[in-house]
Amino acid sequence: MTQRRLKLPDYPRVALVLQGGGALGSYQAGVYEGLANAGIHPNWVAGISIGALNCAIIAGNPPEKRVEMLRGFWETICNPPRHTATHLSNPGTIFDQWASSWGEMFKQYEHSMLGSMSAISAIVKGQENFFKPRLMATGGGAPDNTSFYDTTPILATLERFADFDRINSGETRVSLGATNVATGNFVYFDSEEIKLTPKHFLASGSLPPGFPATEIDGEYYWDGGCVSNTPLEYVLGVTPRKDTLVFQVDLWSAQGPLPVDIFQVNERLKDIQFSSRTRTVTNAVEIVQKLRRIWFDTIDRIPAKVRANDPWFDEMMHDMMGARYNVIHLIYRNKLSEGHYKDYEFSAETMGHHWDTGLHDMHETLEFKDCLAMPAEGENFVTFDVHTHQRSSSGQFTQPVVKASGSRRRPRPAPK
């Protein structure tokens, strides 16, 4: 797939925000390949769970090697390709007429059957270079030894595919969400504040009861998805505020069919639990930005003479203006042949499908070149969703012009 290289507007921040979702995370790798093909290299990556592991590979390699290393990482933690009959998906001439009506159905059935076998294999044997079963799941009384699986293999895998000196160099900001087991608080490990190690990335993906808590400096951490499955709120809430372009990559679709059996109930429950937080965060940010607009509209009703004689208005308008945010939203849409086990189905074939879907979605998104544009004058929050092909705005506002007298005007404070 060929993608033209694009020139971005002058956003001080270009962030890649990666949700948790286990085996579905190869969709994020495909999205990143689409960005790299277009010459877009985020200067901030933020992730939770599998999104955190992808962040390690991206930030831990130079731009020209990131796709290659992502590919190597995913091929390492997934099962080898299966050699199955090809006549169902690529029928010979004798079966062409039959295949035209039944081939796709059998192809989906084959994919579903082999996918479930791969998921069962992950449950029974674990995933090489990622996690392995414990003989005694109850552990020995320590939080980092109480789980069904041992996750220490992933530490060596991360060190193999990511340079942690580069991660901590400041070239790319890295933020990882995790849950403090003792306090229940949501915390972030941020490369601008601490030195990140492989254990910080593992902590973000320590989802119980399958995976144990990860101990860091005497504290124990679980998967950030226990509280929130997206770091979007953190990225948009960091101060000082700056104009920001965000690529938000979700692995769970909030919308889906009504379940008709117990397995579909389990799958639908996961979709809702792990996707709704993103929607909530986006709505909350939009509300705040609308309140900013209303504030400006209100101030505009105050006589200009009153505003000009009081520097408070000038300072408040500077603070309230905040920053402009453009959120590009990509969501992996579930396929009919997938099931409730999709987050732990690590077959090479399914990994490749997720990857190709992410690459396709990113390519299609960038076909709408206006989606990358800086919010227009009077806008402070816009979103774009490739599945709806729509760019929406929180609305427009007009910033009042305040002219304070020179003797009473105070210097504008730095944005908060």
Image (cartoon, rainbow, N blue to C red):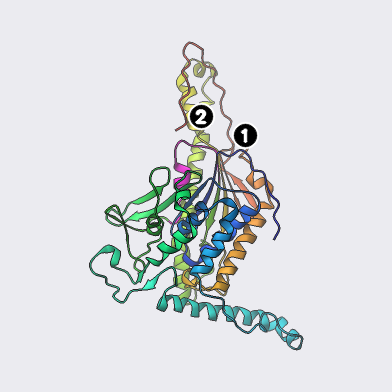
Up the image or down, 357 lies above or below 393; here it is below
Q: Residue furthest top?
A: 407
Residue kind at label 2, given as amino acid type: Thr
The picture places residue 255, in percent across and down from the top left corner, at 53, 62
Residue 90, x across and y down, in percent:
70, 80
Q: Residue furthest left?
A: 141
Q: Secondary structure at mark 2?
A: helix
Q: Position of residue 312 (x, y in %)?
A: 45, 21
Which residue position is annotated with label 1? 377
**Label 1 neighbour load within 10 Å: few <14, some 14-19, many 20+:** few
- Front position in the image: 62 or 277: 62
Question: Which image quadrant for residue 399?
Answer: top right
Q: Nearer the viewer, mark 1 or mark 2?
A: 1
Q: Give the quarter of the figure containing the C terminus.
A: top left
| Frontmost residue, 133 versus 28 | 133
Can residue 20 be seen in this snapshot?
no
Q: Is residue 240 magenta?
A: yes
Front residue (pair 136, 297): 136
> Can residue 334 be seen from the camera position used here?
yes
Magenta-colored stretch includes residue 185: no
Residue, disc 2: 298
Q: As drawn, which residue projects farthest toward the bottom?
A: 94
Element at badge 1?
A: loop
Of callouts 1 and 2, which one flags the residue occurring earlier in the amino acid sequence? 2
Quadrant, the N terminus = bottom right
In x, y percent, where is residue 295? Answer: 49, 32
The image shows residue 58, relative to residue 77, as above or below, that is above
- Amino acid on which the number 1 mark rests in the picture: Glu
Q: Is residue 327 left or right of residue 233?
A: right
> Start and end of the magenta stretch?
229-245
User: Residue at horizontal 65%, vertical 54%?
Assistant: 37
